[in-house]
Image (cartoon, rainbow, N blue to C red):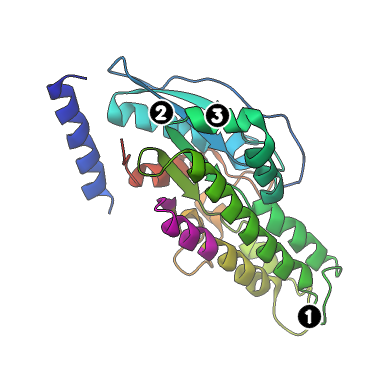
Amino acid sequence: MNHPRRALLILLVLVLHVGCGEEPATEGSTTEEPTTAPAATSSSLDYVAFGDSLATGYGITDSYVYRYASLMGTDTGTTVNVRNLGVNGLTSQQLRAGVENDQRAKDAVEQAEVITINIGANDLMRARWEYRTGNCGGADNQDCLRQAVDEFRANWDAILADITGTRSPGTTIIRTIDFYNPFVDVDRAIYSGVGSVDDFVIFKKYLEQVNSHIAKSSDAYDIPHTEVYETFNGPNGDEDPSRKGYITSDGVHPSEDGHAAIAQELRKLVYEPL
């Protein structure tokens, strides 16, 4: 890259930085569709995406993964080659097993210069279903929700430890993504537990515990993280994202606009250490 091009890249990154002011547990095949974002140079970046149906883009044309790659390519003048390892219905335990034991995943991490991670929605939504059907356990019918949070925390930390053990955040663009609540309006009218507290209040508590751990753990590893939860659900977590057009007709997965919003949240983190 010549000096004028490097200066342009730095300028673009600075402009971006200053200007930024449950899904069904259906197992699917791993998506690996190479894509090339607009490029102005001969240099390239290898981007690996780990995640569930948000990464695969269930129900829509292009997930946030490809939108983010396109934005990155435009902003940096670099060709971005995507390897999407998202799997519909994937849990944090399954992703942990993959990054720890699957040689394909290990090789992908080793070769990656960009990595994004979204996981955990299926963990909590499976527990939510048990809670809704009265099978969660405990005097308050919430044991399975507490267990889901505890297991997620352990799996998430192991995932970050394994990935950063191979690729350092100091030399690799690693980004993590928290997740949103698609059930705000639905759960406000339902009382599945003990007492008079509606399901929205119950589910929100555990969702925020998971998102808080994503933020704290990412910070501990010096990994920038998005706040998709706030974008979709507002600063208090009580806005239904369907009202913003961010959810498809299935009531769970992000729409085209929802995925575009996630990609923009990733973009706001700019591209250090590029």
Sooner in the amino-acid sequence: mark 1 or mark 3: 3
Secondary element type, mark 2: helix
Identify the residue position indicated by label 3 in the image. Answer: 108
Secondary element type, mark 3: helix
Residue most toward the top?
42
Q: What residue type is labelled 3?
A: Ala
Q: In the drawing, does residue 33 fall left or right of residue 250?
A: left
Identify the residue position indicated by label 2 in the image. Answer: 70
- The residues tagged by marks 3 and 2 sit, at their Cα atoms, a distance apart of 20 Å
Visible residue check, residue 249: no
Q: Vertical placement of 85 versus 229: above or below?
A: above
| Front residue of 58 and 144 | 144
Locate the N terminus and report the quarter of the image it occupies. top left
The boundaries of the magenta stretch are 212-225
Residue most toward the bottom?
195
Sooner in the amino-acid sequence: mark 2 or mark 1: 2
Locate the C terminus and report the quarter of the image it occupies. top left
What residue sits 35% from the left and 43% below the top?
A: 170
Visible residue check, residue 103: yes
Give the x, y percent position of residue 118: 56, 46
